[in-house]
């Protein structure tokens, strides 16, 4: 048993959790937000990649995997940074982080407008905050809802179409 076979074995056991297969619909996601939705990770894994399906657009992306905090994102557990330069399935490496099974949020911060693959007609809760491109992902997601007068930095949500979002890792 050597390091090469260990890497090969881990690669062969890697699974994508969430929604990696391209949906037929599409729609634009704007820059300068941290926006995303929930996925389910069904067993404890070591996260190696975070990804999405892209139908159009190019530019930088920051992706964060957040714990679930009562139906909104919680604490940042893994992140990836990359450049979208093509369409289709795109994934970026993360530091290897061991996480338990559970519900997580895959959140995106785009440099430019990106057209995402969507399952039009499959409503889900989308959560977002304003986050200028170039800013670090917050270690803890805001726990207070948006209020223009009292908490303009709070989170917002809406019912949107299911987007292709996923995490990849091995048991």
Image (spheres, rainbow, N blue to C red):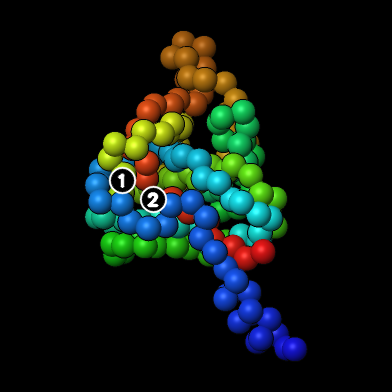
Q: Residue at x 31, y 62 (%)?
A: 88
| Location of residue 104 by image quarter | top right
The image position of residue 96, as x and y in percent, is 65, 63
What number of labels is visible?
2
Residue 35, position as x, y percentages in the image: 43, 38
Who is closer to the viewer here, 134 or 20? 20
Establish if 87 lies above or below 148: below
Is there CB contact under 8 Å for labels 2 and 1? yes
The residue at 29%/36% (across/down) is 121
Cα distance between the residues tagged 2 and 1 = 6 Å
Residue 13 lies left or right of residue 31; in this view the side is right
Using the rendered view, name the quadrant where residue 140 is placed.
top right
Mark 1: secondary structure:
strand
* Residue that numbered label 1 is attached to: 118
Q: Position of residue 46 (x, y in %)?
A: 66, 61
The residue that disc 2 covers is: 164
| Quadrant of the drawing holding the N terminus | bottom right
On the picture, is 110 further left or further right than 81?
A: left
Nearest to N terminus: mark 2 or mark 1: 1
Kind of element beneath mark 2: loop
Query: Can you say which quadrant of the picture contains the C terminus?
Result: bottom right
Is residue 6 rendered to the left or right of residue 55? right
Closer to us: 111 or 73: 73
């Amino acid at each position: 048993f050597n390091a090469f076979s260990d890497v090969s074995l881990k690669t062969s056991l890697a699974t994508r959790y969430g929604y990696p297969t391209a949906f037929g619909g599409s729609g634009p996601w704007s820059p300068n937000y941290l926006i995303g939705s929930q996925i389910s990770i069904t067993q404890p894994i070591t996260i190696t990649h975070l990804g999405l399906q892209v139908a159009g657009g190019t530019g930088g992306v920051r992706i964060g995997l957040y714990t679930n905090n009562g139906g909104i994102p919680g604490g940042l557990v893994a992140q990836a940074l990359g450049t979208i330069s093509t369409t289709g399935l795109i994934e970026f490496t993360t530091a290897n982080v061991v996480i338990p099974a559970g519900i997580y949020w895959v959140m995106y911060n785009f440099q430019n407008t990106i057209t995402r693959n969507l399952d039009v007609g499959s409503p889900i809760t989308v959560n977002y905050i304003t986050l200028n491109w170039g800013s670090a992902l917050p270690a803890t997601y805001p726990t207070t809802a948006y209020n223009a007068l009292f908490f303009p930095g709070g989170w917002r949500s809406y019912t949107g179409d299911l987007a292709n979002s996923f995490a990849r890792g091995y048991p």
